[in-house]
């Protein structure tokens, strides 16, 4: 895939040790699964990547080029593919993005590991050599960090670089809005908590109609006659129906006369009145519900002066719970403590479905700000939301470690050159392992060139020659080689280091697998029982031998 390295790039030897080497095989059985997974993700890598049409189990169609969303939606059967997917998603959860980088680098390292095994390198020495190569690469990363975000510097240029990898109609304007939101949400001591920033996505209107609101806005609407609370809102959050909407248990009420029907209605009215009175006696005057709302219960809430807000997604309740400091209740009882803010009111934000409910606090130390996103289509709104969350996560990392690396594949090529130079001069299994690691890193800028529609061989040859001459700030752009410092294309050092650790760790685990076995149905995952003799006695006397998977 690196397709065109310069003639000076060292090559791996065909045979490291004499003999057939069958004792140190079999081949990596997880390689085919990694190839299949990487084949799906590879066209989506980079700012010029393509998009996928995902069809969910419910028949919904989603257009996205976000590798994290694609990986999360895939139905995988091979255990190695699931492990690789979980490692990539775990890295994306930690760093905000980078799942495509993790999958592609892991697939390239597994391919190089297969070559080393076929060349006769023992598996134990392969794991040791790859671990040493990882340590070498991590030690080289800080020397490549030529830019850092200052504590009083506008973060726009750093956020625009990472948010521009998403398909957006106005990436620059959205990056400026995210930079402003992150700057205003910072603490006085310079720390930043991502939970202070909320994102409210409303379909309808262009992307440039997005704005920043003080307080926390959630997509929703007031359900009853009480539409706002001003002068001290006491909020309760419920992840359950508001009232007796329907029974979860299969049952039928048998009524034989009108008197029994009257008693049945009185019983339901009493339960409804009791539930609402409990909330009123608990000083609740705002109830946020994720679930259906019963008309009788809503009428009772109106009489008690309780504002009922209905939201569609449970994540909205989770965001309110963090900002208000109150738990999400699974039943209609007043929580302890109640969430408190100054006012709760609905606000229309343009045309279409631009309706939101805003929770606001008084004073400059408001615990939350909200980025209200607008887009004409669901796909555009989803892409903008993913880009905003990515930018917020990157800013949180830059507040911890402000160092930035050259992007557009420049860092991967610089690491590949340094590892290849050291591997060519190193004897023993460590040398070929460093060369293999370098070739795996070169596959990433080659993928960028391929997705940009460039001649991969010519671009990689020119890029390798430039890095051999010391131009380590050159990467792959839309028209060929570009200077990442001039184009302001940067990667977060902390995210890159975390990705390298995660990828090499999962590759070392998969490289140690020689067989996939099926457990009996109903048998839980094996765990270390420890020195407990009772668990040892409970083991079956004659367990069946697991059946190996030969495919």
Image (spheres, rainbow, N blue to C red):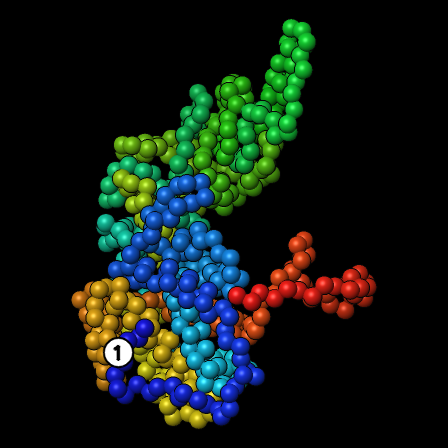
Residue 179: image location, x then y, percent: 31, 54
| Residue 132 visible in this rendered orientation of the protein | no
Say few, some or many: other residues with alpha carbon within 10 Å of mark 1 (under 14 / 14 to 19 / 20 or more). some
- In which quadrant is the N terminus drawn? bottom left
Name the residue located 23 percent from the left edge and 79 percent from the top edge: 461
Residue 518 visible somewhere in the drawing: yes
Left or right: 90, with 201 as reference point = right
Residue 465 versus residue 398: which sits nearer the camera? Answer: 465
Residue at numbered disc 1: 4
The residue at the point 37 percent across, 59 percent down is 40
Residue 225 placement: quadrant: top left
- The residue depicted at 42 percent of the width and 74 percent of the height is 111
Q: Position of residue 87 (x, y in %)?
A: 48, 63
**Residue in the picture at 52% in, 38% down:** 339
Q: Is residue 311 left or right of residue 486?
A: right
Which residue is the extreme one toward the top?
258
Q: Nearer the viewer, residue 480 or 544?
A: 544
Q: Nearer the viewer, residue 152 or 413?
A: 413
The outermost residue toward the left is: 479
| Numbered disc 1: secondary structure | loop
Tell me: residue 452, above or below residue 430. above
Nearest the eye: 437 or 97 = 437
- Residue 497 position in % (x across, y down): 42, 71
List x then y, in percent, for residue 381: 32, 44
């Amino acid at each position: 895939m690196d397709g065109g390295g310069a003639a000076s790039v060292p090559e791996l030897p065909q045979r490291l040790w004499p003999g057939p080497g069958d004792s140190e095989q079999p081949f990596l059985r997880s390689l085919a699964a990694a190839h299949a997974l990487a084949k799906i993700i590879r066209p989506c890598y980079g700012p010029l990547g393509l998009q996928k049409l995902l069809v969910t189990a419910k028949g919904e169609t989603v257009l996205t080029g976000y590798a994290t969303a694609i990986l999360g939606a895939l139905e995988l059967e091979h255990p190695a593919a699931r492990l690789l997917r979980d490692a990539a998603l775990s890295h994306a959860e930690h760093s905000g993005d980078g799942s495509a980088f993790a999958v592609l680098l892991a697939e390239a390292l597994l391919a190089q590991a297969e070559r080393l095994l076929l060349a006769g390198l023992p598996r134990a020495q392969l794991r040791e050599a790859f671990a040493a190569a990882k340590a070498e690469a991590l030690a080289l990363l800080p020397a490549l960090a030529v830019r850092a975000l200052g504590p009083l510097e506008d973060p726009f240029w750093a956020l625009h670089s990472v948010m521009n990898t998403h398909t957006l109609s106005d990436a620059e304007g959205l990056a400026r809005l995210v930079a402003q939101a992150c700057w205003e949400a910072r603490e006085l001591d310079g720390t930043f908590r991502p939970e202070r920033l909320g994102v409210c996505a409303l379909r309808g209107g262009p992307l440039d109609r997005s704005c920043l609101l003080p307080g926390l806005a959630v997509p929703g609407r007031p359900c009853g006659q009480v539409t706002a609370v001003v002068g001290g809102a006491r909020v309760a959050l419920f992840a359950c129906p508001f009232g007796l909407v329907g029974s979860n248990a299969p049952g039928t009420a048998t009524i034989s006369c009108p008197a029994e029907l009257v008693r049945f209605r009185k019983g339901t009215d009493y339960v409804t009145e009791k539930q609402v009175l409990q909330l009123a006696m608990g000083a609740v005057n705002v109830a946020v519900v994720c679930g259906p709302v019963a008309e009788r219960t809503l009428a009772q809430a109106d009489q008690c002066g309780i504002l009922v807000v209905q939201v569609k997604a449970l994540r909205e309740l989770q965001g309110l719970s963090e900002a208000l400091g109150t738990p999400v209740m699974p039943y209609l009882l007043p929580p302890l403590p109640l969430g408190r803010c100054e006012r709760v009111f609905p606000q229309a934000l343009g045309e279409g479905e631009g309706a939101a409910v805003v929770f606001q606090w008084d004073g400059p130390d408001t615990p939350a700000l909200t980025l209200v996103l607008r887009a004409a289509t669901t796909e555009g709104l989803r892409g903008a939301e993913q880009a905003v969350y990515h930018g917020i996560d990157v800013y949180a990392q830059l507040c911890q470690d402000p160092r930035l690396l050259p992007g557009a594949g420049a860092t991967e090529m610089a690491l590949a050159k340094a590892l290849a130079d050291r591997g060519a001069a190193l004897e023993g299994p460590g040398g070929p392992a460093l060369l293999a690691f370098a070739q795996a890193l070169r596959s990433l800028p080659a993928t960028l060139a391929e997705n940009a529609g460039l001649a991969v061989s010519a671009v990689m040859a020119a890029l390798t020659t430039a890095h051999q001459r010391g131009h380590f700030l050159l990467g792959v752009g839309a028209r060929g080689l570009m200077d990442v410092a001039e184009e302001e294309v940067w990667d977060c050092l902390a995210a890159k280091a975390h990705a390298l650790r995660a990828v090499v760790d999962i590759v070392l685990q998969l490289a140690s697998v020689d067989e996939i076995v099926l457990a009996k149905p109903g048998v839980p995952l094996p765990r270390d029982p420890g020195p407990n003799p009772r668990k040892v006695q409970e083991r079956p006397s004659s367990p069946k031998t697991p059946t190996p998977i030969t495919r």
